[in-house]
Amino acid sequence: PKQVLLPKFHSIRSQQTPYAAPSVTKFQNEEESRCFEIFSRNTAYEIFPNVEMGRLRLMFLQACEARDAIRHAIIALGALDMTSRVRSQGNVRDAARRDFGSTASRHYKYAVQEYARAIKYAQEEGGQDLRTALMTSLVILAFEGWIGSHEIAVQQIRIGTRLLMEWKQQQ
């Protein structure tokens, strides 16, 4: 009988990197690389926790090679995760404000800086394909929700829904 080969699934938090950093480095410094690594090893599993979302996690990580907006948003999310790990209680933004000189504050400031770069690149990339526009909306939603900006997070849900509805009408 013919044997069907299926992909192996690793544990949710595999010790191996689920996706290697881009082969030709797109990172401008060690901090960007470290935050990408945190995202790929930890944050991606927290945002997309179940096995069925593995393909979505991989899509985001692969998009980092081609899309600056998504790469910088993922770096920002990795930096937020580092902030959360240092300051494990309460709102990330409030914790960073309380202790301005702390490690958490430095990670938070870096996250905001990378997030601003992601937004800048998203605006520059403008007329993106639907897939990239939806992915950008999702990482913005994740960032804004994480820092407690629920109005902006809900706005991103509406934008993503509108994009999908427009696409569906064109089909």
Image (cartoon, rainbow, N blue to C red):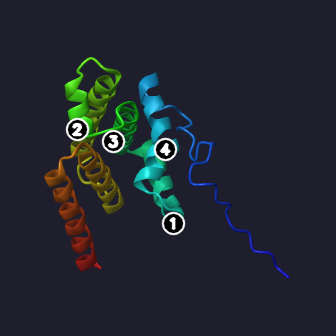
Pick whichever of labels 2 and 4 is earlier in the sequence.
4
Pick whichever of labels 1 and 2 is earlier in the sequence.
1
Farthest right residue? 1
Labels 2 & 3 near each other (Cβ < 8 A): no
Q: Position of residue 39 (x, y in %)?
A: 45, 41
Q: Amino acid at mark 2?
A: Lys
Residue 56, compared with residue 68, is above or below; it is: below
Labels 3 & 4 near each other (Cβ < 8 A): no
Q: Which mark is residue 73?
A: 3
Pick whichever of labels 4 and 1 is earlier in the sequence.
4
Q: Where is the N terminus found, in terms of image quarters?
A: bottom right
The residue at which mark 4 appears reads as 42
C-alpha gap between disc 2 and disc 4: 26 Å
The residue at which mark 1 appears reads as 52
Please tell me in which quadrant of the rendered image residue 129 appears.
bottom left
Q: Position of residue 154 (x, y in %)?
A: 18, 59
Farthest top residue? 101
Q: Amino acid at mark 4?
A: Asn
Of labels 3 and 4, the one closer to you? 4
The residue at which mark 2 appears reads as 120
Pick whichever of labels 2 and 3 is earlier in the sequence.
3
